[in-house]
Image (cartoon, rainbow, N blue to C red):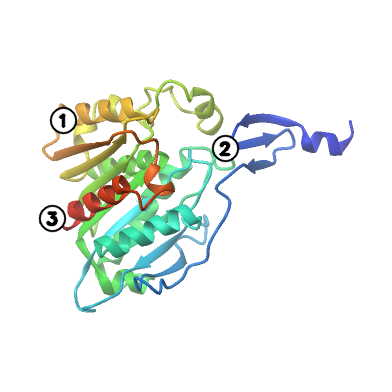
């Protein structure tokens, strides 16, 4: 066989997301554009890229708001991006801009996690990376960690974890794990799930490819509403966003109902954006409903 033809022959394809060629090469069909870290001239938000583990290559982009009182310690938001566990990164324009907006509006330090993506790194690698990133951040509570912005500016009694779509799946996982296993050095106050991917019965083929050890769409790792230990979640406040036209909407509502019945002692809110689709706020951040969504996040983070 001509080696050139084998290098262009497709083994698996998920239109608009990615394809795998028979020679093992992976091609992402979107979400590959990146922007460098920067200082925003309008808001004063600064960002920089950091390595969390030289061994695995786990990295992140960290965002710092304009400091009006350098002695004041700020909440920390550990943010985990979406993209079907396969596309996008903290360095893509969508997620850089979103993290910078949350940093400025909520006056928080944001650690946007660059977990290793499938299919090159099949799940549950992203779960482990996200948990490692949260532990890495919490280890700065002694003010002697490798990242000065965390040492100098973060109140580790006010840590939040948030993410959208697949990132919301990872967010739930790490906050739940913190409740089960404990998290040294930091107190998770709240969890924010933007349009979470908890399955909908139609993505089983994708999971077969990127999560071969998954036990189906009711596996608690992808559908935590089915987890008998759901009530052990490691925070006391949860905010769930859903969108009316989102194909993942029903499972998010089911998660909300399951959490209320789980025996967990916290408070969960759910807010639905009428007439909107999946992660609309990333693509149209200036629309009224996206602005309202961000302001709800600001209120959630800054309430006592």
Tell me: residue 28, above or below residue 92. above
Labels in figure, total:
3
Which of the two residues, 116 or 291, is positioned nearer the viewer here?
291
Viewer-nearest of discs 2 and 1: 2
Which residue was labeled with disc 3?
Answer: 303
Q: CA distance from mark 3 to mark 1?
A: 21 Å
- Side (left or right) of 21 relative to 98: right
- Count neighbours of disc 2 (C-alpha within 10 A) and say few if under 14, some if 14 to 19, many if 20 or more: some
Q: Secondary structure at mark 2?
A: loop
Q: Which mark is residue 126?
A: none
Picture coordinates of residue 174, whole percent (x, y): 32, 44
Which residue was labeled with disc 2?
Answer: 17
Q: Quadrant of the C terminus?
A: bottom left
Residue at 43% across, 44% down: 82
- Count neighbours of disc 3 (C-alpha within 10 A) and say few if under 14, some if 14 to 19, many if 20 or more: few
- Count neighbours of disc 1 (C-alpha within 10 A) and say few if under 14, some if 14 to 19, many if 20 or more: some
Label located before the other in sequence (3 or 1) = 1
Labels 3 and 1 touching (C-beta < 8 A):
no
Which of the two residues, 212 or 193, is positioned nearer the viewer here?
193
Using the rendered image of the protein, determine whether residue 215 is visible from the camera's viewpoint.
yes
Residue at 24% across, 79% down: 70
Quarter holding residue 230: top left
Picture coordinates of residue 95, whole percent (x, y): 44, 54
Which of the two residues, 110 or 246, is positioned nearer the viewer here?
246
Which residue was labeled with disc 1?
Answer: 260
């Amino acid at each position: 066989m001509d080696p050139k033809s084998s290098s262009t022959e497709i083994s698996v394809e998920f239109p608009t997301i990615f394809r795998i060629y028979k020679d093992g090469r992976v091609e992402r069909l979107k979400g590959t554009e990146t922007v460098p870290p920067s200082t925003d001239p309008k808001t004063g938000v600064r960002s920089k890229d950091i390595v969390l583990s030289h061994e695995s290559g786990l990295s992140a982009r960290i965002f710092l708001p304009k400091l009006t009182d350098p002695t004041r310690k700020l909440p920390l938001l550990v943010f985990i991006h979406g993209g079907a566990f396969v596309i996008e990164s903290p360095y893509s324009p969508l997620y850089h801009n979103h993290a910078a907006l949350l940093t400025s509006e909520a006056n928080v330090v944001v650690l946007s996690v660059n977990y290793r993506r499938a299919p090159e790194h099949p799940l549950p690698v992203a779960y482990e990376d996200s948990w490692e990133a949260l532990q890495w951040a919490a280890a700065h509570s002694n003010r002697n960690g490798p990242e000065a912005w965390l040492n100098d500016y973060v109140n580790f009694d006010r840590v939040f974890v948030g993410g959208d779509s697949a990132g919301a799946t990872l967010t739930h996982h790490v906050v739940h794990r913190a409740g089960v296993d404990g998290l040294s050095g930091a107190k998770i106050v709240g969890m924010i799930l933007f349009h979470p991917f908890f399955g909908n019965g139609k993505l089983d083929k994708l999971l077969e490819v990127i999560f071969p050890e998954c036990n189906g769409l009711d596996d608690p790792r992808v559908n935590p509403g089915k987890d008998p230990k759901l009530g052990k979640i490691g925070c006391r406040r949860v905010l769930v966003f859903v969108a009316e036209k989102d194909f993942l909407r029903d499972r998010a509502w089911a998660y909300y109902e399951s959490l209320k019945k789980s025996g967990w002692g916290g408070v969960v809110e759910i807010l639905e954006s009428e007439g909107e689709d999946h992660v609309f706020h990333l693509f149209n951040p200036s629309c009224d409903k996206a602005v309202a969504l961000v302001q709800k996040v600001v209120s959630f983070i800054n309430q006592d």
